[in-house]
Amino acid sequence: MAEVRISNLTKTFGGITAVDNVSFETREGEFFFLLGPSGAGKSTIFNLIAGITPITEGDIFIGNKKVNNLKPGERNVAVAFESYALYPNRTVYQNIRFPLDAPVRKKDLSDSEKDKMVRDMAKLLQIDPLLDRYPKELSGGQRQRVSLGRTLIRRPNVYLLDEPIAHLDAKLRHQMRRELKRLQQEQGVPAIFATPDQSEAVAMADRIAVLDKGRIQQIGTPKELYFNPINTFVASSIGEPKITFIEAEIERKGNSLYLQKGNVNFKIPPKICKVIEENKISNKVIFGIRYSDLEISFEKKQEEGYLECIVDFYQINGEKVVITAVHDELKLVVVHELDRDKMIETGNQIWLKWESQNPYLFDCESGENLIP
């Protein structure tokens, strides 16, 4: 088993630092994700691991071997890029089979074994009817599947998968998430997957490294990142719909605490009040409210704790409807079961109650989580 260990990895291009002192290591057989927006440094890290781009500072270990000075072909790394990189003069069959015919592996398998592996992989990727075609005769999604098949057909020390299913249609993308996870678990080969799609990362990852501007913000399981984000960037990177941030004062009225913003007073749930008191948090903070923290009512509520809001926007998503509601300066996102007998329209009144069981409190200056 060849785990990957990255130590203080840095890459600069002129005066630009694309990867800034990055360190992480994969565990045995895990699916490790690099999650971040475009420009976060994901592809550059892959190029450094694969040996395509030289390192400025730091070390890369595959297994127990330091590979800084090894050529790409000596690292036994399989890479699938979003950009396909297919051989235009080779058929789909020949493109997928190409890694098996490389000089270092040419004699490892018989022709019949290679043929079976290619056809099995093509069937898995649903491109078996296309084996005689050339890349120019394929759609973007078909090309991406060929590129993915060429990567998965060999057994390397590590898989580097750079948005390898980004151009597939939704149904096939969902299926390929499951198949990629299954293949990786069966082979036991470490896989590092780069994506800007948090839903993909949460669905597939054992652990996730959240990247921003070339630096790792936090590493953890999807659950750890969701419930215990180190800062607002991580909190906004995990969860759909995204968390709502509200910069507001903490105001006390009797035995209760309120989120106070402009003319809005929103009662803070008891569990969060307890955390505020225990950690002596005061003055202005950034509150994070997830859609699951809000209870919704379409009937007028007179009891304390409910905030009257107006539906500003709504979007039907399968069996759910995602509602953006406003009250003066406050904007909140809530999700509700779709009900054919209850029509939701822009301008409707709804009543929301904050029932959070998990505190999200961040510093206004740094965005850092205030909860130890």
Image (cartoon, grey):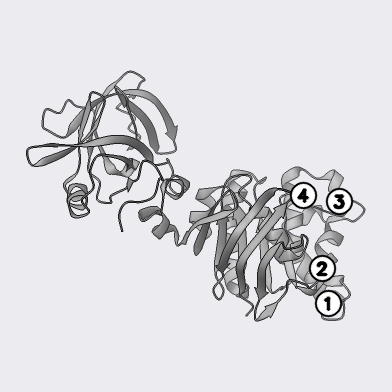
> Are the residues flagged by discs 1 and 2 in contact, CB closer than 8 Å?
yes
Does the rendering let one see residue 73? yes
Residue 102 occupies quadrant: bottom right
Which residue is rendered at x = 78% and y = 66% of the image? 118
- Rendered image: mark on residue 22: none
Q: Where is residue 292 in the image (x, y as percent from the top left)?
A: 31, 44
Q: Nearer the viewer, residue 32 or 114?
A: 32
- Rendered image: mark on residue 133: 3
> Are the residues flagged by discs 1 and 3 in contact, CB closer than 8 Å?
no
**How far is mark 1 from mark 3, CA to CA?**
25 Å
Q: Position of residue 360 (x, y in %)?
A: 32, 48
Whether residue 153 is situated above or below residue 92 in the rendered picture: below
Residue farthest to the top? 347
Looking at the rendered structure, the secondary structure element under dot 1 is loop
Residue 264 occupies quadrant: top left
Looking at the rendered structure, the secondary structure element under dot 3 is loop
Label 1 vs label 4, nearer the camera: 1
Q: Which residue is tagged 4? A: 143
Label 3 vs label 2, nearer the camera: 2
Which residue is rendered at x = 67% and y = 62% of the image? 160
**How far is mark 1 from mark 2, CA to CA?**
8 Å
Which residue is rendered at x = 87% and y = 50% of the image? 134
Disc 1 packing (10 Å; few <14; some 14–19; many ≥20): few
Q: Please name the amino acid that badge 1 sits on.
A: Arg
